[in-house]
Image (tube, grey):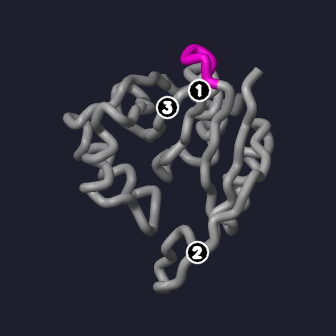
């Protein structure tokens, strides 16, 4: 594990509507096109699961998933810029794999921007592989749209 991660006090907890303001701040710090407040509110209900990653009781990231039968759909994963590049993406995925196994899930699926080289590398490292393509899925700041790769990881 990255030494910077080892020197932090990372903990996980379930997020709720009471965490919305902090989640929105982190989302806006991390993404040029963040999810809207309404999207986040919609995801903080019974049909989705939100996890917070905290360092010394301060949220430094969030993850939103949906469990559908025996699969997990990873909808949003965020680490604020000050904590990026320290191995926390791998920590998030390890946490997600553990949760999925505890929930008796067989696979995890997600979409990733086709241009996001670091995320694609991270996902490959953790056993994800391409199963599809969604044309013009993600908005870009230039009023154009970008393709999404659909990735899957199978759980044993």
Query: For the residues marked 1 and 2, what is the alpha-carbon distance in whole angstroms?
Result: 28 Å
Question: Which residue reaches farthest top?
Answer: 102
Q: Is residue 115 left or right of residue 57?
A: right
What numbered label is drawn on residue 136? 2
In this view, the residue farthest toward the left is 18
* Secondary structure of residue under mark 2: strand
Magenta segment: 101-105
Instruction: Indicate left or right for 120 with 148 as reference.
Output: right
- Residue matched to label 1: 70
At 20% across and 34% down in the image, what residue appears? 18
User: Would you name the residue on which mark 3 appears?
Assistant: 67
**Neighbour class for label 1 at 10 Å: few (<14), some, many (≥20)?**
few
x then y, percent, for residue 48? 38, 36
First-in-chain label (1 vs 2): 1
Task: Tell me, yes or no, if residue 6 can be seen here.
Answer: no
Q: Nearer the viewer, residue 57 or 135?
A: 135
- Label 3 neighbourhood size at 10 Å, few (<14), some (14-19), many (20+)? some
């Amino acid at each position: 594990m990255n030494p910077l991660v080892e020197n932090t006090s990372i903990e996980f907890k379930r997020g709720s509507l009471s965490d919305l303001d902090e989640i929105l701040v982190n989302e806006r710090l991390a993404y040029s096109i963040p999810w809207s407040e309404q999207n986040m509110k919609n995801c903080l209900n019974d049909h989705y699961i939100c996890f917070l990653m905290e360092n010394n009781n301060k949220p430094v990231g969030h993850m939103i998933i949906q469990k559908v039968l025996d699969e997990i759909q990873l909808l949003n994963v965020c680490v604020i810029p000050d904590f990026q590049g320290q191995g926390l993406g791998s920590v998030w995925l390890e946490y997600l794999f553990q949760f999925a196994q505890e929930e008796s899930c067989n696979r995890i699926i997600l979409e990733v921007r086709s241009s996001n080289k670091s995320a694609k590398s991270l996902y490959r490292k953790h056993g994800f592989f391409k199963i599809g393509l969604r044309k013009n899925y993600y908005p870009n700041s230039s009023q154009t749209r970008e393709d999404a790769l659909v990735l899957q990881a199978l759980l044993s």
